[in-house]
Amino acid sequence: MPVSFKELGLVNTKDMFADAMAKRYAVPAYNFNNMEQLQAIIQACVETGSPVILQISAGARKYANATLLRYMAQGAVAYAKELGKAIPIALHLDHGDSYEQCVSCIEYGFSSVMIDGSHLPYEQNIEVTRKVVEYAHARGVTVEGELGVLAGVEDDVQAEHHTYTRPEEVIDFVTRTGVDSLAIAIGTSHGAYKFKPGSNPEIRMDILHEVEKQLPGFPIVLHGASSVPKDIVDLINKFGGKMKDAIGIPEAQLRLAAGSAVCKINIDSDGRLAMTAAIRKVMAEKPEEFDPRKYLGPARDALKELYKHKNLDVLGSAGRY
Ligand code: G3H
Ligand code: 13P
Ligand code: ZN
């Protein structure tokens, strides 16, 4: 039985983005695959008074089970209230790769979907995105499209180089598809290895500004926005990890982007790093432990601290609710 996100107490991204645009901050979009990640996200966002977009990828649905994840998101709404604050929570499909996948998520109660046609030829990207928008908008669900290809791994596709978004295409794409937000490629990339050691870790703010000029007041999304904090990577390596030359987007650049038309910033890898570091530490320092709560608990705490820091010091989403 299809369920509407409204029955689950979730919201779509419309009002969230309107507020973020007016007040010049970015809404955090954090991925989750399990209970500890979801708890950390909700605790951090309630404690900082931040709206949040809970992201589920196709990989997450495969890993955790689509039904379980849907009930977990529903539970998150009640959990936030129980913690003392009814923050706005959207449930979003991250990198939807087909119309059918978007429909399935909407039937499971997602309030927002991304249709990622960025690897397709331009006209095909428009065609599939418009089809998703038609289905989604009829149900009050918001849609994110993407133009340009991020370097690094986007699902199974390995892009060697960035194909930056072409600002001259954005008006045509947005008008013909009817999307509610647009993900752009300006030099961010997925994963923990975003720049070569010794290279300049800079994103193309000039392209972002050009896009803003073309689409005044239109919500822009940044994927691949983890900062890969050095202290966390060092901790992983100290406790037996092997993560050489992991480099992310400097926080100062994300702060600048959040103050522009960028209304949604996607962060997944930093959370993975924080959990891994905490788990490695327990494993190394207390080899006698075998209760998962003894290592997943500290991992959850580390994740919560990381997200609080993002909301407060990077995205500017803290204290909005
Ligand atoms: O952009 C991708 C997200 O980090 C989700 O990653 O497909 O491994 O779940 P995943
Ligand atoms: P990171 O790998 O930089 O965390 O990006 C996550 C993302 O874009 C999810 O869609
Ligand atoms: Zn992404």
Image: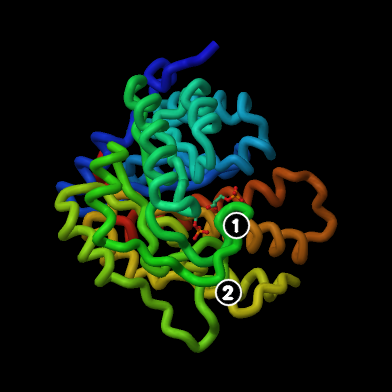
Residue topped by disc 2: 246
Label 2 secondary element? loop
Please give left or right for residue 184 compared with residue 151 in the image.
left
Q: Which mark is residue 192?
A: none
Q: Quadrant of the C terminus?
A: top left
Q: Is residue 296 visible?
A: yes
Please tell me whether residue 60 is drawn above or below residue 241 in the rendered image.
Answer: above
User: Which residue is more in the foreground, 126 or 201?
Assistant: 126
Q: Residue furthest top?
A: 1
Q: Is residue 87 visible?
A: no
Residue topped by disc 1: 157
Quadrant hosting residue 234: bottom right
**Front label number (1 vs 2):** 1
- How far separated are the C-alphas under marks 1 and 2? 20 Å
Quadrant hosting residue 256: bottom left
Task: Give the mark, 1 or 2, whose residue is nearer the N terminus.
Answer: 1
Q: Residue furthest bottom?
A: 198
Label 1 secondary element? strand
Task: Name the kind of residue labelled 1 in the image.
Answer: Val
Residue 151 spot, x, y in % from top left: 50, 66
Please tell me whether residue 20 is drawn above or below residue 106 in the rendered image.
Answer: below
Residue at 49% across / 54% down in the picture? 119
Residue 255 spot, x, y in % from top left: 30, 64
Q: Residues within 10 Å of mark 2 (few under 14, many from 20)?
A: some
Q: Residues within 10 Å of mark 1 (few under 14, many from 20)?
A: few
